[in-house]
Image: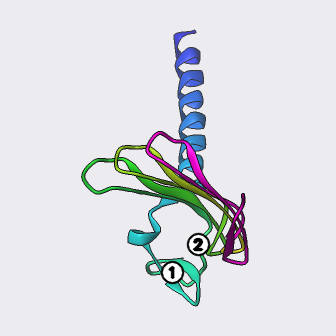
Amino acid sequence: MNFLIQNRLTVLILIVLSFSIYFIISTKTICDDLDGFTREGVLYLKGSNKPFSGNSRCIWDLTNVTWYEGKYIDGLKEGLWKFYNLDETKRSEIMYRRGKMNGPRNIFNSNNDEIIKMNCTDNICETVQ
């Protein structure tokens, strides 16, 4: 009976480890400034010829505070990107589509109050009143 419980526990641990390893590999987070390079506007990881798809999160060197974070699809910025100050307050949020600013771009003050609201189309942004 004790042997059967140990085997089930071992199988359960192996399953959990397998899912954990898969999750870590499939949700790779890089810092594009350190881990990648851009060629013709497309991000590649160093040593790779395939455009990067995954998360990007860079931190300020000594403080371990997030500098910016967002996502790449086929080497292009996609979706919401957030930028932060050294004091961990939000600096700005920008929507990207296929590597270009498209949609809202909001800039915040040190109290996290939105102070500038813009709307962007193909990297051209205009202030919204």
72 sits to left or right of 39: right
- Separation of disc 2 and disc 1 at Cα? 9 Å
Residue in the image at 48% along x and 57% along y: 68
Tell me which amino acid carries mark 1.
Ser
Range drawn in magenta: 101-129
Magenta stretch: includes residue 81:
no
Residue pictured at 72% horizontal, 78% vertical: 122
**What SS does tag 2 mark?**
loop
Residue 41 shown left or right of residue 129 in the figure? left
Where is residue 50 shown, x and y percent of the image?
Answer: 60, 80
Position of residue 31 relative to residue 40, above or below, is above
Element at label 1: loop
Measured as percent of width and height from the top left, residue 23 is found at 59, 47
Q: Is residue 114 magenta?
A: yes
Q: Dots 2 and 1: beta carbons under 8 Å?
A: yes
Residue furthest out toward the bottom: 40
Q: Nearer the viewer, residue 48 or 114?
A: 114
Side (left or right) of 79 relative to 38:
right
Q: Position of residue 51 (x, y in %)?
A: 61, 78
Mark 2 highlights which residue?
52
Q: Is residue 48 above or below residue 126?
A: below
In the image, is residue 126 above or below residue 69? below
What secondary structure is the magenta-colored segment mainly?
strand
Of residues 66 and 112, the one drawn nearer to the viewer in this rendering: 112
Query: How many other residues sit within 10 Å of disc 1, few (<14), some (14-19) or many (≥20)?
Result: few
Residue occupying image coordinates x 34% and y 50%? 86
Which quadrant would the C terminus be assigned to in this image?
Answer: bottom right
Indicate which disc residue 48 carries.
Answer: 1
Q: Residue 13, percent across and down?
A: 53, 30
Instruction: Look at the picture and state if 64 lies above or below 118.
Output: above
